[in-house]
Amino acid sequence: ICIVNAMEGVETELNALILEHLKSRGYLQSSATLETELQHRKFKPLPIVQSPGLLTKFLLAFEHGDRAGFFNLWDQHLPLPLKNGDPTCQSLEFNVSVHFAVYPVRAGTGSGAQAVQDFKSYLENRGAVLAQSQEFAMFCALPYVPDPSKHPTFKTIFTDLWTIELKARLEQFLRLAISEVSDAPASSNTRLFSIYTSSKGLRTSGTTMGEVSTLQKKLSDQEQHYEAKLMELQTNYHTLVGISMELVETLESSISGQQITSDYIHGLCSRLFGSAVQQGIDLTRPGTTTALLRASVTALTQSVQLPQRPATQQQQQQQQLPRQQKQQQLPQPQQLDYSKMKSDLKRSSNTRKALLLQAIRWRLTRSLAPVMDGALRDFISNDILGCASPSSECVIGALLCNGDPGVQEQAARLVNAFCSMGMGRAYITQSTHLVRTLCDVAIARLDDTHTQRNVLGSIQKISLKKSLQTLMIDAKLPHWLIEFLKGVESLSDYSLRYALALLMNLTLRTAGKKACIPSGAIILRLLGDLLEYDDTEVCSYVNGILYSLLSVPELRSEGKTLGLGELLSSSIKTSPPEIKSQLKYILRQLGSDSTVQEDSGDDADNEDDEEDPEVIEGDEEDTLTMDESVTGETLLASEYQVSSHLLTFTPDINIVSSMRWQSLLH
């Protein structure tokens, strides 16, 4: 009997080892069949005891409503670029925050006041931008609804199905996003595998995991290698294009009788074959440069084959430009005399200043993306606008205050073009003096001119940074925007959209809301008139402003006095679904008794995660018309181009690198 019991114990343990190994390898059907067979034979396998992996820790925190533990893991193990740049990641983070907000009510563990407060804090900080989207706008009302479980709008998030689906999506995402995601032990760490490798004299950690580590290192090395190779190819491409243009110019000069010196040819060849010069190869020997060039092209063709990309919308638009505009575009911009350009922006005639500002902008707006990116880097590294200099040296700030309307307009257009790109915004916002100047220029007038539109567009594009929001509120921008919007009937669509978007961003802050209190009746009446505007983008901005302002008791009382509730109820009946849901939350906000929450006091800037648009703003309805022979690239080439055989250009990448990181991190 003892022997039989011992054998049954051994077989029971063997069954457990086999089941553990099958499950860890993913043989779920086989493991299920084995379990059925064991039950039929009345065997009870030993339970598999596993230490929780990272994925398990995430899911346990999710299931138990442990918000702090979950987001500690989230912040610790997910890379920042993924959290800031991946829409799926951001959507999951928002939905998981909703889950934790309602968990106490769902689980019956209390009133959940702290959970709701945590969610409210999330909406005002990390979730502020996402909360403005149509998908998540309705959740802005969640903290203010007394019993959301009984509210029809939030009925779905209290169902088991919603929680199960969210958990499944979260698990699927985490399995792809983090390195250690498996609940089950790794196949090399199962007990059966360990017994086998021990019998063969192998070391598990040194064999399987070591190989994985080696492969990961090789993959990382290969990635770095190809990134370096790509950068080298891009640099060589720009060099070749520049040299090709110089050769064409040289040929044209030779036709007119100008002699080409051997030193000039040697200089070009040295730039083409720097490594050959270092190896002591004589480039002056006939046929040498041609042989080297053919060999390099053959090697490049054999080693690198980059996939072709379909033309973007911007490239298609560029192909459809009139011939005269195409001639303004350069395959690769030539090096410019930036010292002379900055000097002329300060001291030349107003006509020259306006034309030069226009030419700088055209180099950005009328070039294809790779060329535009290089031109922007050149402008920033040479601090063409003076944003990286002391306020007294801020060239563009002085031009915005120039008494000549043409100069002022071209300066505003150029700033708007810079602000349309992430790296440009990081460069512009280096100068708080310039931001104050933009505010001063805007506040000085109420008319809807081209200058005003571009200034307004520039300010709105940089208004998500908290430090700049504070500056703008202190400059009385909310009050000016209310006065500006009084003339809504005469405003262009551009000015209306950007004015409302800017006011919405500023009213996200407590100080911005309070700045609207003195003009509460005016702004609420204006917004009420715009509730049924025939532009959904405008309606979204209007709804965002209303929702923010109605969190202030004084403005909420004013809204009730003005009959805003009746207007909202009427608009709900005729609005499209996405706008209708926003209006319902605003109506509930109007009837709530919430108080405005003070800002956290943290003036850290929100992250600038906006993608660069396909079309850079600033060119719309350009009113500057002069003789074509002295505009755009013609002006830059004739007055400011530096011949590369006279000057070797070594770019200072410090400012560009700084701007690039700022555009990624802010």
Image (spheres, rainbow, N blue to C red):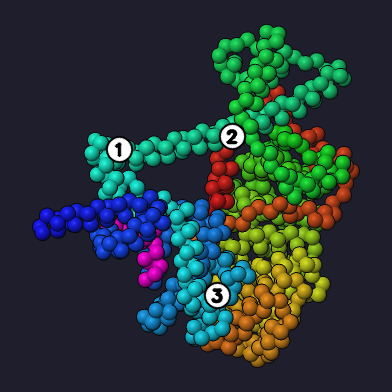
Earlier-in-chain disc, 3 versus 2:
3
| Relative depth, front residue between 583 and 396 | 583
Considering every residue shown, the one lying at the far right of the view is 627
Q: Which amino acid type is shown beneath numbered disc 1?
A: Gly
Horizontal relation, residue 604 to residue 365: left or right: left
Name the residue located 50 percent from the left edge and 68 percent from the top edge: 165
Judged by depth in the image, the label closer to the viewer, 3 or 1, is 1
User: In the drawing, what numbered circle is on residue 486?
Assistant: none
Earlier-in-chain disc, 2 versus 1:
1
Kindly indicate whether the residue at mark 1 contacts the one at mark 2 (C-beta within 8 angstroms): no
Position in image of residue 26 (x %, y %): 40, 52
User: In the drawing, what numbered circle is on residue 139?
Assistant: 3
Name the residue located 87 percent from the left edge and 39 percent from the top edge: 629
Is residue 629 positioned above or below 615 on the image? above
Specify the quadrant of the image occupied by residue 567. Answer: bottom right
Residue 66: within the magenta? no
Name the residue located 26 percent from the left edge and 44 percent from the top edge: 194
User: In the drawing, what numbered circle is on residue 206?
Assistant: 1
Is residue 272 positioned above or below 489 on the image? above
**Alpha-carbon span between mark 3 and mark 2:** 44 Å
Instruction: Check disc 2: other Cα within 10 Å, few if <14, some if 14-19, many if 20+.
Output: some
Is residue 132 positioned above or below 209 on the image? below
Position in image of residue 400 (x %, y %): 72, 55
Q: Quadrant of the N terminus?
A: bottom left
Instruction: Check disc 1: other Cα within 10 Å, few if <14, some if 14-19, many if 20+.
Output: few
Position in image of residue 606 (x %, y %): 54, 61
Q: Which residue is mark 2?
A: 230
Residue range in magenta is 49-64
Instruction: Check disc 3: other Cα within 10 Å, few if <14, some if 14-19, many if 20+.
Output: many
